[in-house]
Amino acid sequence: MKFRRLILANLFRKKIRLILTIGSFAVALFLFAFLGVVRGAFNRGADVAGADRLVVIDRVSIINLIPLKYRDQILQIPGVKCITHNNWFGGVYQDEKNFFPQFVIDPENQRQVFPELVVPDDQWNNFVKDRQGAIAGARTAERFHWKIGDRIPIKTTLYGGGSWEFILDGIYHGQRPENDETQFWFQWDYFEERIPQAIKGQIGWYVLRVNSPDDAVRVAKAIDAKFANSPNETKTETESAFAAGWVKQFGNIQFLILTIGSVVFFTLLLVTGNTMAISVRERTSELAVLKAIGFSGRAVLFFILAESLVIALAGGVLGLSLALLAVPALAKALNGMLPQLVLEPSILVVGLFAALAVGIASGILPGLGAMRMRVVNALRRV
Amino acid sequence: MVRVDGNGGSQSLIRVRGLNKTYSRGGEKIQVLQGLNLDVDKGDFVAFMGPSGSGKTTLLNLLGGLDVPSAGSITVAGDEITHMSGSKLTQWRARHVGFIFQMYNLIPVLTAYQNVELPLLLTKLSGSERRKHVETALGVVGLADRMRLYPRQLSGGQEQRVTIARAIVSDPTFLLCDEPTGDLDRKSADEIMALIEELVAKYGKTVLMVTHDPVVAARAHTTLHLEKGVLVEGTASSRQSVLAGGAA
């Protein structure tokens, strides 16, 4: 393009200002990507939830246990395909900072309800036969350098306290990158054997699959109706609603992130808009000369928009590239502390478009001013 | 042949009839030009003089299509420009007018070569064709060896030469010079005037120039004075006395 040299020459006119403006874009876009990653991490439960899965918890609170005997009654409800149950263990491996979620599972049905978490058959068969056996997610196994056959002691202050020892029989992998690979599973029978008498036969929650997502609402209502007015009333909801409710316990993350993101972009718009306005004002006479020698108002607008877009693009690419480097490093550093941190391509695409939109918005007003500027008036100011 | 009585023939390159320009300032109407007539033939070199505020630059702006008159008409090479739309006028300027400003008005971030090339970016010329034109124009103004320098690396006189090269590179119909030597010392001013004279004499350019300086004006074929909104021809004797004074 023959105007390339003119646009680039104007861009590099004030190098420090250019670097600072591109830097503003880079920081804002890095922050945007990071907020997107955090938002995605908190919403991941809802995103990966099976459309045909329901979660049944105690109506009052998830920390209240519900009877195991409900299982057979739930299975009798038409539309229920299979059901499993879990308990939260809440143990500590070596040190409290080594957090990862541990669940008591029902080996008979776990794989039918969560088919996306894949364990090789031979490992699973060993696990089923081994009362002390455990399955760990690939990320947790990698984090602690566990291998099959390792003995893993986990201390707990619940369930009578003490250290429980497990033998790692298998490692599961998620079928999708966003599947949680940090969990640690062990057998219901081993758990039931060691817990105090008072809580035997009580589970934390049920997860069930229905024949069709269309059955979900009806089945949920039927389950809750079945246990209404019992000592342990239930609350049944889709897995995605359950996950979303779980995230809400941390506060309105979505709103917080949206607010911070909006403030960042609005500030960026003010900063770059002001920069472009100053930049255009500084060369009023030059723009007037361009118009005098035959460049149209539209051409002048194009030059200014091209400059602001190049700045936005450079800053955006820089910020998002930094995020591409930083997010995996951060995910590694925060292993297990937060759900999986993934910088999804959609965040990069939206970020780039947002940067370009800010670029256009910051250049459009000074550009229109220059486009409409009367040459005679502008030259008189010289 | 330059005429200001409105009786010039239709073959004039520039033909101005009944030109009026009125400004509003603080509710007051100021009539700068009042029924001005002018005929300029191809190859003429005309200087406009007059006190500050007499409307010299306004006249130049109107002739260059940078401003529109309140009444009257301007016809250049058969094109009536007073009724052209803004975009047509922009295109017309690119084809027909070369501007030379007092303050040079070069783009400081472009080299001399790139500054001169600017008007050609609006044409369909290829890169190599543009290069030929730019090198020729810079050769005419004697700056072929300075084309890679930026304006800040040039003297005032050299900057004005670059401006002249930019004005002539697209071979416009006429040149408009607004105080072309106003920011230069006498020696540089003489060199610039010699160059403009050469453009007229050797290349047949038509030049219309505004100046405060009678010595500079005396280099033109014709000097016209703006008085009370109309043009009055300078006399031969006044020209002679200026030249004699300048020589002394």
Image (cartoon, rainbow, N blue to C red):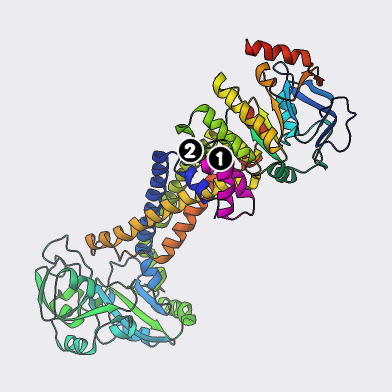
Image-quadrant location for residue A49: bottom left
Image-quadrant location for residue B53: top right
Instruction: Determine whether A250 is above or below B55 in the image.
Output: below
Res B146 label = 2
The secondary structure that most of the magenta stretch takes on is helix
Q: Is residue A227 left or right of residue A146?
A: right
Can residue A231 be found in the magenta stretch?
no
Give the crowd class for mark 1: few <14, some 14-19, many >=20 residues within 10 Å.
many
Residue at 64% across, 54% down? B124
Observer able to see residue A71:
yes
Could you say which is closer to the camera, residue A116 or residue B58?
B58
Residue extent of the magenta highlight: B110-137
**2 and 1 marks in contact (CB < 8 Å):** yes
The residue tagged 1 is B138
N-term-proximal mark, 2 vs 1? 1
Res B230 label = none
